[in-house]
Image: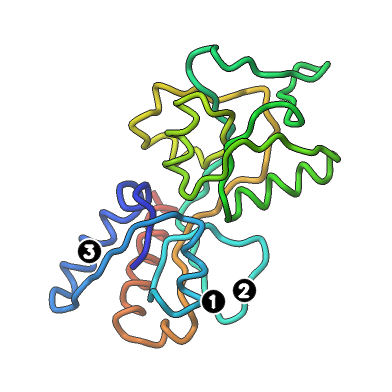
Amino acid sequence: LYASITAVYRLLPQLLEAYRSAYPAVQLELRTGAAEQAVELVQNAEIDLAVAALPDRQRSQLEFLPLTTTPLIFIAPKQDDLALPLTASGQLDLSRAPLVIPQLGLSRWRLEQWLKEQRIRPNITSEIAGNEAIIAMVRLGCGVGIVPQLVWERSPFRTEVRVLENAPELDPYVVGLCTSRRNLQRSSVQAFWQLAENQVGKGRQD
């Protein structure tokens, strides 16, 4: 199982506890890392299951189970040391603001699509692997970052960065489990998937 640190803290505790209780003989291996690598690891058969952002385009031979939805937000250092350029309408000017963005992944793709539609050439100062690391770099004053709100809420640096209200609105993240159709035929993977489906169904009823 592969997940980001945020997913381990926020999305997996109850699911892992339920799985261990129901199937104590199954050995679980949990790997953590950058969320944007999750889908690729499943596709390359390096991981059985991953917590990942649902891609905008369905990939063949992969299955996704949505668990939660989280907005994409722009953040800046808490202090006003970083002067943020604004447009005439008072919006964040992404053609001049220094940007700290993911090296890969859905949030980068969505940001690039928005910039392309607006015909904006961005000022990218840093490309970082991992949303948690983006928040750390923003805290240090390296620029404006874009991260899922769910990551910001769990960050130890949450109080040292601020959410920008005058920034573009991008489509939210849908976060869930990802596996291959082949893996889903395996009893251990299928059992984990079914427990997750039950938790999602219970959450909707609550």
Q: Position of residue 119 (x, y in %)?
A: 86, 40
Mark 1 lies on residue: 62
Place of residue 159 in the rendered image (x, y in percent of width and height, measured from the top left): 39, 22
Quote the CA–CA distance across marks 1 and 2: 6 Å
Residue at x-position 29% and y-position 81%: 188
The residue positioned 52% from the left and 44% from the top of the image is: 70
Q: Position of residue 130 (x, y in %)?
A: 46, 48
Q: Is residue 24 left or right of residue 128?
A: left
Determine crowd level at label 2: few under 14, some 14-19, many 20+ residues with C-alpha closer than 10 A.
Answer: few
> How many badges with numbers are in the image?
3
Residue designated by label 3? 18
Q: Amino acid at mark 1?
A: Leu
Query: From the viewer's perspective, is residue 140 above or below residue 131?
Result: above
Residue tagged 2: 59
Where disc 3 sits, the SS reads helix
Please name the residue shown 67% across and 66% down the image.
Answer: 57
Viewer-nearest of labels 3 and 1? 1
Label 3 is placed on what type of residue?
A: Ala
Q: Image quarter for residue 118? A: top right
Mark 1 element type: strand
Q: Quadrant of the N terminus?
A: bottom left
How far is disc 2 from disc 3 in space, using C-alphas? 29 Å
